Image (spheres, rainbow, N blue to C red):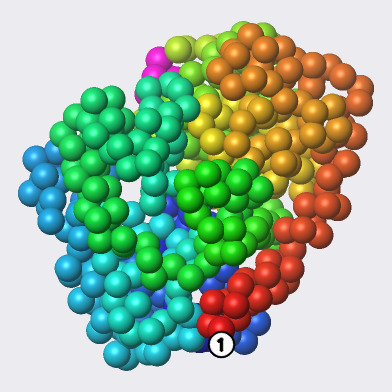
Amino acid sequence: MRVLLVNAFHWPKGGVERTYFDESRWLSAGGHEVTHFATRDPRNLPSPTSAYFAPPADFTEGGSTLKQLAQLPRALWSAPAQHDMERLLAHARPDVAHVHAPSRHLTPSVLRALERARVPVVHTLHDFKPWCTNRLLYAHGEICERCRGGAHWHAITTACVQDSRARSVVGAAEAYLHDALDAYRPVRLWIAPSAFVRDKALTFGVESEKLRLLGHGVEAPPAPGEPPAGTPERYALFAGRLSVEKGVRLLPAVAERIAPVPLLVAGDGPLAGWLDAQRLANVRTLGHLPDGTLAALRARAAVMLAPSLFVEHFGYSVAEALLDARPVVASRIGALPELVEHEVTGLLAEPGDARGFAGAVRRALDDPAAPRWGEAWRERVRRVGAPEAHVAGLLAIYGEAMR
């Protein structure tokens, strides 16, 4: 089968790209012909179709607002991305296109090119961008669905797009235009990576016959590396983006409650400087780590933390911890309770409850039953998240879309 994978980025930026590259590798290993469409970037990994990638654009959080406003037409509907997708389709006729997160770097203009070329489209819901102006259903510290039903003007009043009024104006204009153009009409099937995402998409009006549940594949690194020098014997671990929605502001309360046990923090993001400024004696920030180094840290952790405040769609860090038989303390939010069953595979705490979450971490460190929690779902994660099972699910969905 000839499969075209579409994503804004073709370098390992985050969880979306993790899925995109995993699926690319697994499909290729299964004998399928895989091509890609993304934006050009010096960090890109090799691709047989990189010559057809769309020109880059800067819509990053730290980018210049004025520069981003100057690129407004491309953010709303990228004519260059549509043109380059048309060039690619003239060169390589895929049997199916699998879209991940085009974002405003590509925009849904690429879906229109696929529709005109009569290429069946499936789309994984890594976020709620088709219905939520800032895609997260989260604004200023709380779950937010103000824009439900197309009321995207709320994004402007709350300045929820990257905490900027100007960028929220762009986001609202983009959302209204996409609604008016029925931009996601070409999608034949949506892939929900969790039951939570599937059920939430139904509330946004997606027809049940167009939704398929397929969790992300998860596999252990082939050769875990060594942990950083000076890694303590026993520690708690947070691994992820250092941002408000990931619950990073709760980490000082956790560190205080578990002292003198160290809390290691792996990752980078907008709150990295804030966390360092707390100057907590038992917190060690490690920055972004190579996969092998992170795998080695995770395999030795006494407990993994997932204090998210927003609705997680899957939870890679949790699934990987369970694969390593590590106990997990997670927020009772989004898809995380589908992986963490309270007092069976870990502990759940209410999102945003710093004291309650810290207490749960302390319990996970002290409870003699904790080592068995991670073990309880290890085999289930291995079975359900096995790459071959995931690819079989993908091929079934692709076949449906093609029919």
Q: Is residue 73 left or right of residue 259?
A: left
Q: Is residue 42 above or below residue 301?
A: below
Work out whether 150 lies above or below 327: below
Indicate the amino acid at tag 1: Met
Residue 136: percent from left, percent from top: 43, 38
Dominant secondary-structure state across the stretch colored magenta: helix
Determine if residue 395 is in view.
Answer: yes
Q: Of 206 and 72, which appears nearest the observer?
A: 206
Residue found at x 14% / y 38%: 65
Picture residue at 39% right of the left edge, 70% below the top: 186
Residue at the location (32% across, 91% down)?
91
Quarter of image, res 384: bottom right
Mark 1: few/some/many CA within 10 Å (<14, 14-19, 20+): some
- The magenta segment is 272-277
Q: Is residue 38 above or below residue 295?
A: below
Q: Is residue 19 visible?
A: no
Q: Which residue, given by chain and number where applicable, does mark 1 sit on?
A: 1
Q: Is residue 273 magenta?
A: yes
| Quadrant of image for the N terminus | bottom right
Judged from the image, the secondary structure of the residue bearing numbered disc 1 is loop
